[in-house]
Amino acid sequence: MKTAILVFPGTNRERDAADAIESVSGIKPVIVWHQETEIPDVDLIILPGGFSFGDYLRVGAIAARSPIIDALHRKADTGVTVLGICNGFQILTETGLLPGSLIRNRDLDFICRDINLRVVNNSTRFSQSYALDQIIRFPVAHHDGNYFADAETLRMVEDNDQVVFRYCDPAGEINATGNPNGSVNNIAGMTNKAGNVMGLMPHPENLIDQLLGGIDGRALFESLLGRAA
Amino acid sequence: MKARVLITLKTGVLDPQGKAVQKALGTLGFDGVDNVRQGKVIEIDLTETDETAAYAKVSNMCDKLLANTVIENYQIELLPDGT
Amino acid sequence: MNAHDTRNNPEPLVDADLAADHGLSPDEYQKVLDLIGRTPSFTELGIFSAMWNEHCSYKSSKKWLKTLPTTGKRVVLGPGENAGVVDIDDGQVVVFKMESHNHPSFIEPYQGAATGIGGILRDVFTMGARPIAAMNALRFGAVDHPKTRHLVAGVVAGIGGYGNSFGVPNVGGEVNFHKRYNGNILVNAFAAGLADADKIFLSKPTGVGLPVVYLGAKTGRDGIHGATMASAEFDDSIEEKRPTVQVGDPFTEKCLLEACMELMASGAVIAIQDMGAAGLTCSAVEMGAKGNLGIRLDLDNVPCREDAMTAYEMMLSESQERMLMVLDPTLENQARAIFEKWDLDFAIVGETTDDLRFRVFRDGVEVADLPIKDLGDEAPEYDRPWTMPVPRPALEHNDFADTDIAASLLTLIGSPDLASRRWVWEQYDHLIQGNTIVRPGSDAAIVRIAGHEKKALAFSSDVTPRYCDADPFEGGKQAVAECWRNLTASGATPLAITDNLNFGNPEKPEIMGTFVRAIQGIGEACKILDFPVVSGNVSLYNETNNEAILPTPTIAGVGLISDLRKIVPSGFTNISDIVLLVGAPDTWGTHLGQSLYLREIHSREDGPPPPVDLEQEKQAGDLVRSLIADGLVNAVHDCSDGGLGVTLAEMAIQSGIGAAITPPQTLSPVAAFFGEDQGRYVMTARLEDRAELWDRCEKAGVAIEEIGSTIAGELKLGNADAIFVKELQERHEAWFPQFMNM
């Protein structure tokens, strides 16, 4: 699986993503600097976590106006797989590749801990290695992960089955207790309408090794590998 | 001239920071506070001297970068130099 | 207009009064006059005040710091550089330091703490090491003091805001509350980085006529006289000091890190120094003096973000995220391109010279011309008078009424100093970089070395200020011993420490006495435990309205784990394991003086602290480490605050598994469960390994006692009512969020 990782000033989880990709696929990803205007021919483009441009103005806003973003649009339009994790998800909403927006967490604090997710759609290229309704554990590490979309947009997202992961409690119930940041409909991860672009607030790349406390994140990358193979 | 852009969250968008301020005001004993919405102000010094042109320019800035029109509204105020 | 604001004004006249305003005593000012043979210019006075204040010159502490052991077979570089450097095999080194940002954090908690993190991270990456872990030791005032909650919220948000954005995992630390910190909180920030042993960068340049380059963010008026502020006592005029607080920009710092890593790889760096306290002054003078060179600075080339800055302001600004470098001139273009890529300033602001002078120019006028080595070498050094601390009388036998063990344990486990710090560390990104093996909340945090499957580093930060207050010598020993013990319990071989010594006004003989005795205690423990000091920081004058903080020599230690697969958790792992108490000289606990039990249950802070037997400590620790390595134990936790009862409760809370414990009939249950005797570990093991464990302990001369076994769901201490582990967990977790949301 050939992978490109887009890096902006302030991106800080690019190594985590690269390590996860290399661990699952055996191939080192290429790093693409935000001032480039072309993305090489790859199977997967990752926008990793971090605080691009300090997240000043709005999270992801300035990164979404970088030179590389035109190339990202072109790739996404031709169906290349795009995965935005955390800050990457925020950037994707700012580019318009994903609907809605990510705003300050409900309780205003930065949150770093493991949370539970329920796989509500396993027919996407990002989730095919999970079972439907599987309860998994990923860490989150964000200050602005509170997904918001207006009622109209939300209805379209739900009607098109674009939601892939929802926050849930340890028993798998999708409720307020299991929702760490106030996201509408407990949305943690979603795709675009075409299904090739995904945004995800939690960090699968930080839970791919039993030594680090779990491997629930691995199947996401294996899903993508399965598609690329 | 100077442009002052006022960016506010659209009605219906949850504003956790505004809620926190409202709660804090209540704790401090300010009653009768129905609602608080937090926004931001951006001040821009422009070389443009024509108001219409300046307004158009700043609107464009807002649409392209300063505001996220998915969740935010903006208002532009133009201030002649020397204010 | 105040005296420091010289915009569009002639410089103020320099005299003894102005020198006093700059924190120079009459004797010190006379020394300046003698040294240069004339009245200094205003800028020169500023330079002297920056170089000769306590923070930069260590004038009260130097004599005693020299007594600490700083060498060892793994020590590559001890104190004197930006951070200490220690060998961790395979051609790799760990670079680490702890530094205080106490005064700024009290004045503006968010920015004070944030810039503290920024400063310590720069200390580490200036040396060529990429930061891989951070910790913070925080001390706040009493929980019922009106400022405490605001300060906790601000400091924690500031640490998170900076560290999370920069991208370093914040893996551990300490949070304590005590009324003696009401007017002076402590924010001690630790950072560790990883580098190849042959790619360490130093601040000592060689070569004359080489360009001196300014890197990073622009200079503003922020923080002017921050270092002087850090060396003064507080009084009620504190609010007026607010403008000297610097503002941190973690985004710029992250860019500076990446740019420096690229720059160092390019070969362009001859020497590099972080601009920390007293910014341009300290960094330029230190580089020149170390390299036996003069430095000439042309301030007209310094990138500024404010208009009309004077030489005085530029020399004393503490704007953050800046560095000074001596450049290989043949690589200037490559170096400049790297900084342009990261959108950071790169400006040649001077050159090295052979005249050993520190000459500074502004608008073509020479505003300073000083002997560069004398600025550091001739800084005042004091042998401050000190008095021997008075020992606390021992507790009388039956001095207080016994209380119910179960009820006392529930109170203790939910008390401010023992309750879970989850509220704090969940606001810190402790997982970034993908190597955090043991997360916060255990004995020591463990971070894997990227690229190694089995190798890892363990980190722990420790001190028990109430012990130090009661007996600074034993308290100093205990801080080092506890850090060493925490690393040991995590399965690591302790390597070295950094010390962050926080005390009151050293001009008071009784305060100086606590400082001297604590250092002597630290030194003795470091020697016997083979745990040298490789870096550190001293913060004095932590007093408000004449009341000093508790003496707080924070010790942050680093340990090496050669095989991660062998480490064991600090929580119980199986039901029906035997529970063992190892290392206790008196077998069970006896020492209740200065215990948390006495303080939390009986509201008393009396008695001497528990003594530390360092020889016994070493024997027990070395044995425990070998038992872990040989797979003979499956959980290890050291006994510290709160004694055996709290240790067992923490092991239960971590795992959800309980234990049934039977103390000897002859012993008072309160002393057995809440005595804070040192040098002890609680471990669990399989029943079938019992004989071998006894054999090993006997051979090592270390006491071992079987005290019970693990059971499902509840903790039963002697004859006390059993407590559900779930209830312990709830009590443990409840306090912090409740306190912060009050």
Image (tube, coloured by chain):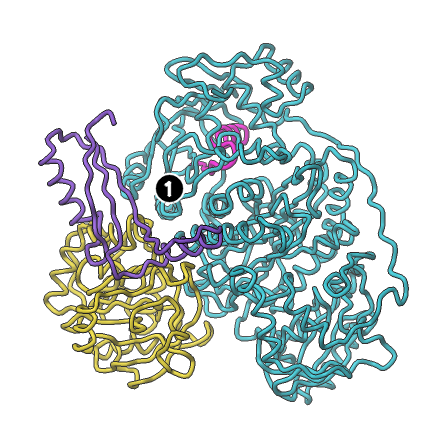
What is the span of residues highlighted in magenta in the rendered image? C270-290
The image shows residue B41 at horizontal and vertical percentages of: 28, 43
The image shows residue C301 at horizontal and vertical percentages of: 35, 25
Residue A161's place in the image compared with C575, above or below, is above
Chain coloured cyan: C
Q: Where is mark 1, residue-wise?
A: C267
Is residue C624 found inside the magenta-colored segment of the image? no
Is residue C284 found inside the magenta-colored segment of the image? yes
Q: Residue at x 64, y 47 (%)?
A: C182
Helix, strand or loop at mark 1: loop
Kindly indicate the quadrant of the structure image that contains residue C658.
bottom right
Report the front residue among A213 and A63.
A63
Residue C530's place in the image compared with A3, above or below, is above
Residue A135's place in the image compared with C42, above or below, is below
Position of C350 with respect to C723 (left or right) is left
Report the front residue among B7 and C124.
B7
